[in-house]
Image (spheres, rainbow, N blue to C red):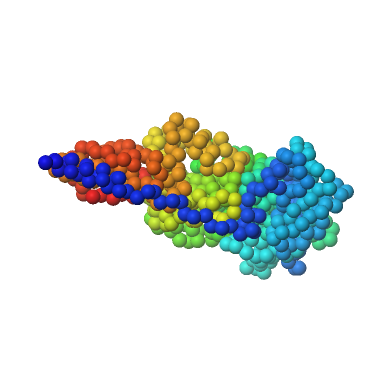
Amino acid sequence: MMSLYLAVLTTLVLAQAQQPAPAAPPPLRPPTRAGVLRGEYGRYRANNDLLYYHLNVRIDPERKTIAGHNTIRFKMLKDDTRIQLDLYANLNVDRIVSGATTLEYQRELNTVWVDFAETLRAGRTYAIDFYYSGTPKESGRFGGFVFGKDPAGNDWIFTACEGQGASIWWPNKDQWRDEVERMDISVAIPSGLADVSNGKFIGKTDLGDGYTRWDWQVQYPINNYSVSVNIGNYEHFGDRLGDLPLDFYVLPGSLEKAKQQFAQAKPMVEAYEYYFGEYPFRKDGYKLIEVPYSGMEHQSAVTYGNRFANGYLERDWTGVGISTKFDFIIIHESGHEWFGNAVSAADVSDMWIHEGWTTYLECLYVERLFGADSALKYTNAYKSKIRNREPVITQRGIHRTPPQDMYFKGALFLHTLRNVVADEARWFRLIRDVFQKFKYRNIMTEELVAFVNEQLGRDLTPIFDQYLRRTDLPVLELAFNDAEGTVAYRWKADERAFNMPVKVGAPSAWQTIQPTTNWQVMKTPLKKDAFEVATDLFYVATRKQ
Ligand SMILES: [Zn+2]
């Protein structure tokens, strides 16, 4: 007769043999032509490397028009006669010139194929001036390009176009992989209004026709969608953090509230510098600019519309009494200066590199200012916002914004990884090294995983894949044999090679086990009900039997 213990094991082995094959990744959705044109890094994008833009425009609030040109300098990587640029179909292409030569072009949806009479040679640098005009369309979550009014009736014009793309209002190579090294932004507007764009303020010039041109210089690589104009009746006040200029632009009625609320910028920069290193756009400075929508991480020119109150739009964002201690928009959007703007994803499919990391940065900010217990509470409160309905990383090359899980599951995944590393000094060195290694670069998740594996000297790829490329959480299955005083354990995960340490037992004395997808058995003095899994440290599902 078999012992009860063997019987249990036999059952477990049988169960394992009968376990269905892991779920296949969800089927790919057929992309639209517009989606491909927008998202694919095709031949006529890949044949060149962006170096520089000078966007030089005049914005007329009365006629609701924008007109001007973008000077685009690029280096050819392959011999070719055509490049792909983008400008929404509702805007006019006035002419595209290279020196004295007018270039041919063809429009297809929101793409502009620019043709050269002679072959452009690999290794050489070229420049074109792309003249355009028209009325940009309002669209998307924050408006895209909005000709608005402030409460006093003054013009208040702004851009926020991450989803739709910058080509909603200006011509550029509208994709994520390739960024210009630097950029000049010149914006002519009716005198009396102010324009706040990205980078360092160079100066303003009265054009003598009722308009004034505001010149800004971006001295670092920049995402197209980060390029912004914010035009309004702004008041300016400033501060410094060491040699970093902090500049604030708000409507006159907001000035007193802003002076109070924006004091949070300093400890925010200090906290992120503590974890990751110097603010990455030092020469350009740091700015907060009041806008009528909640906010956006425009590089070195973070826009702010969080009502000068803590929390997120006056709500306790994670619902556990921590969010009310700080201004969510200042802390979150500014975190993107490190992850999103400095370290950028090369394709929107991998946008968790922006949002998952920045949400995790919020957790680190809480840890730095309010302590580890508050951070643990804040981080775990994000679980309630996670759906686990589709993978965090989406199909590449079609420009579809990934599901919201990229924020919250992304952050909980990094929190889990910290506990997998299980060495605080090593973890904090790792995330600092990740930032330092990849700042000013556009990367895919694979590069990040390879770097982490190399730094840690272990292969965490199946863990990354399970959390980011699969829908379901790993499930820690536990089968108790109270008579024998044992528990059998394994991971149920889509990734066959998934193996991840986890802490179990009693919270006062967690014990680390190394489950794989195969059953293992260990002795435990704890009965089924008393045996716990450290789910505050590891974002996993559990199943006891
Ligand atoms: Zn964000």
Residue furthest toward the left?
Answer: 1
Q: Nearer the viewer, residue 246 or 453?
A: 453
Where is residue 28? Give x, y as percent: 52, 55
> In this view of the protein, can residue 89 be seen by the observer?
yes
Q: Quadrant of the N terminus?
A: top left
Q: Nearer the viewer, residue 155 or 92?
A: 92
Q: Residue at x 29, y 45 (%)?
A: 16
Q: Residue at x 44, y 35 (%)?
A: 459
Q: Residue at x 74, y 55 (%)?
A: 112
- 281 displayed left or right of 192: left
Residue furthest toward the right?
Answer: 100
Is the residue 64 above or below the residue 521 in the image?
below
- 31 displayed left or right of 364: right
Residue furthest toward the top?
Answer: 457
Quadrant in the rendering for residue 401: bottom right
Number of callouts in the render? 0
Q: Residue at x 59, y 45 (%)?
A: 346
Where is residue 168? Give x, y as percent: 68, 59
Q: Nearer the viewer, residue 331 or 183?
A: 183
Q: Nearer the viewer, residue 444 or 14?
A: 14
Where is residue 490? Give x, y as percent: 30, 43
- 454 displayed left or right of 156: left
Where is residue 515? Give x, y as percent: 32, 39
> In this view of the protein, can residue 206 be seen by the observer?
no
